[in-house]
Amino acid sequence: MDILKIMGLPEGYCTRHTDMPNHLQTKAKTLCWEYNQTSPTETERRAEILQQLFGTCHPLTFIEPSFRCDYGFHIHTHGLTIINYNCVILDTSPVHIGANAFIGPGVCLACAGHAMDAAQRGEGIGTSAPITLENDVWIGANATVCGGVTIGAGSVIGAGSVVTHDIPRGVLAAGNPCRVLRPITEKDRITPLEITPDRK
């Protein structure tokens, strides 16, 4: 099967580095570089670049530089997506980001992996599996989500976590390895301050 078709499958795969279409990373690296050079006021230019870079890019996708990815065309945003500084997405498989996603600074979504066996790893044999963030997910700063993981709708991943297995819906999960701490309930609702507009 063609490597691009394999990369786009909804399940994981194993391949040699020589089989990967590394030449296709040039476009992504160039667009990431251009994006990371933009001024904070160049919102339209940023939107244009993301439309060129991602496979699916919802208009309400906002990313703070610096941002890096492998291919770009395997990244799909499906609603409001806020990605903070220094995010890395290794999209050797599809990455689906649901609506109302909040991704903290320093987060890594890593579909790609390497062989556990040292000899195979030295030969450039690697793995990849998709990542899915369902709707309303918040991933805290400096968390890592590994390939093959689905994070359920409404869940929160604590800062610094390493997510190696699926996380169910509507829970707070944290740690290394990341584990469910408790469900998110009505007690977690907060009341914002009432701010009076400044009248001059």
Image (tube, helix red, strand yellow):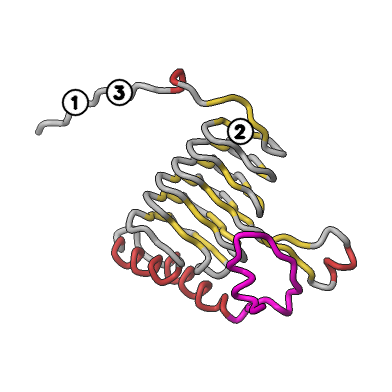
Residue 22: where, in percent of width, then height?
A: 63, 78
Whether residue 120 is in magenta: the answer is: no
Outermost residue, right direction?
119
Residue on which the image places disc 1: 196
Q: Check whether the beta carbons of the residues at disc 1 and disc 3 lie within 8 A of each other.
A: no
Outermost residue, bottom direction?
23
**Quadrant of the rendered image containing residue 42:** bottom left
> What residue type is disc 1 on?
Thr
Residue at screen point 56% across, 58% down = 88
> What residue type is disc 3 on?
Leu
Residue on which the image places disc 3: 193
Q: Is residue 136 above or below residue 6?
A: above
In primary-sequence order, the first of circles 2 and 3 is 2
Tell which of 184 and 168 is nearer to you.
Answer: 168
Residue on which the image places disc 2: 173
Q: Check whether the beta carbons of the residues at disc 1 and disc 2 lie within 8 A of each other.
A: no
Q: Give the range drawn in magenta.
A: 1-23
Whether residue 6 is in magenta: the answer is: yes
Q: How dense is the environment of label 2, judged by Cα within 10 Å: few (below 14), some, or many (20 and up)?
A: many
Outermost residue, front direction?
1
Residue at screen point 49% across, 75% down = 30
Between marks 2 and 3 in the image, the one whose residue lies nearer the viewer? 2
The residues tagged by marks 2 and 3 sit, at their Cα atoms, a distance apart of 27 Å
